[in-house]
Amino acid sequence: MKRYRDIAGDGGSNIVGQVEAQLGKLRQRLASVGAVVAVVSGKGGVGKSTLAANLACCLALDGSRVGVLDADLNGPTQAKVLGVRGRRLVVTDEGVEPPRGALGVKVMSMDLLLAADATPLTWDAPVQDEAHTWRGTVEANAIREFLADTNWGTLDALVLDLPPGTDRLLTIASLVPTLGIVIVTIPSDVSHLVVRKSITVAAQTKSPVLGLVENMAGLFPGPDAAKLAADGGIPYLGSVPFDRELAVSADRGEPLVATAPERESARALQLIARAIRAALAPRAV
Ligand SMILES: Nc1ncnc2c1ncn2[C@@H]1O[C@H](COP(=O)(O)OP(=O)(O)OP(=O)(O)O)[C@@H](O)[C@H]1O
Ligand SMILES: [Mg+2]
């Protein structure tokens, strides 16, 4: 077996060149995107995907051209929530055309690439036992390609729905330097414990932190989200009540802000979207 020191240069693959070419493509693609907003949380199941889809729809309702990238490769839900599950992807010279979901929001998700069965994505590695060590790198590459290969066209905002986990944010921030970060929590001590760390990581990215959203308010009495935001030195964007209709409409692929804008939860989402728009104002969403 050849060892790395036996190989002259990088063995002729020009890996550095390939990565630079991809990054150049990514920069070019994002040049026509006004703002990139990542919805994140170290905690799973707090409603990141639901909020990402509904906030994207709120921006679209206000006249913005919006896209959503489902950066959750192993638990993709945006195709379902935005009603494009099962659509065939069309590839042109310009890249992969993202299907338009609710309110014309453009969607790209691993769910549109994988066969419609229950097979999860597995990370390949020379030795499967070591697959976890490759995961971070492969995941970053996949997301970079997703971003760069999709023909987003001109967008006012591209919303990224991240999988749970604090480390994920660092990967994305290294790919997209000017990222507006929205952090999500629910009213529980357990969630606050983890989200506090997400706030610390968000600060390390040097990207603008747009603020903290409390989701599922009223489900149980929990700690004060406004205080969590204040303690972390980030803006508090507001609170979305627990509303079973939000879950039902997401399962139907018809985001609630589009179908029932008068509901309390939908109105809360609209206010949060406006606060995000205001925070992004210099980048003109
Ligand atoms: N405010 C809410 N009221 C009622 N149900 C909600 C609310 N927010 C989200 N849900 C529901 O809670 C469930 C989890 O939400 P979601 O998938 O958006 O969480 P997530 O943070 O993206 O999860 P993951 O960490 O797995 O990516 C979904 O069934 C969703 O419809
Ligand atoms: Mg999710």
Image (tube, rainbow, N blue to C red):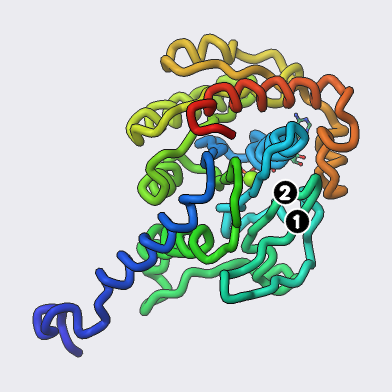
Of the pair 156 and 256, the residue shown nearer to us: 156
Of the pair 271 and 94, the residue shown nearer to us: 94
Residue 13: image tag? none
User: Percent from the top left, x then y, of residue 249?
Assistant: 86, 41
| Disc 2 secondary structure class | loop
Disc 1 Cβ-to-ligand 2 distance below 8 Å: no
Sequence-wise first label, 2 or 1: 1
| Disc 1 secondary structure class | loop
Residue at image mark 2: 105
Disc 2 Cβ-to-ligand 1 distance below 8 Å: no
Residue 100: image tag? 1
Residue contact at pointers 2 and 1, CB within 8 angstroms: yes
User: Percent from the top left, x then y, of residue 189?
Assistant: 56, 20
Q: Quadrant of the N terminus?
A: bottom left
Residue 172 versus residue 201 in the image, above or below:
below
Q: Residues within 10 Å of mark 2 (few under 14, many from 20)?
A: many
- The amino acid on which the numbered mark 1 sits, given as a three-letter code, is Arg
Q: Quadrant of the C terminus?
A: top right
> Which of the 4 image quarters holds residue 19?
bottom left
Q: Residues within 10 Å of mark 1 (few under 14, many from 20)?
A: some
> Which of the 4 image quarters holds residue 247?
top right
> Which of the 4 image quarters holds residue 16?
bottom left
Residue 207 versus residue 220 in the image, above or below:
below
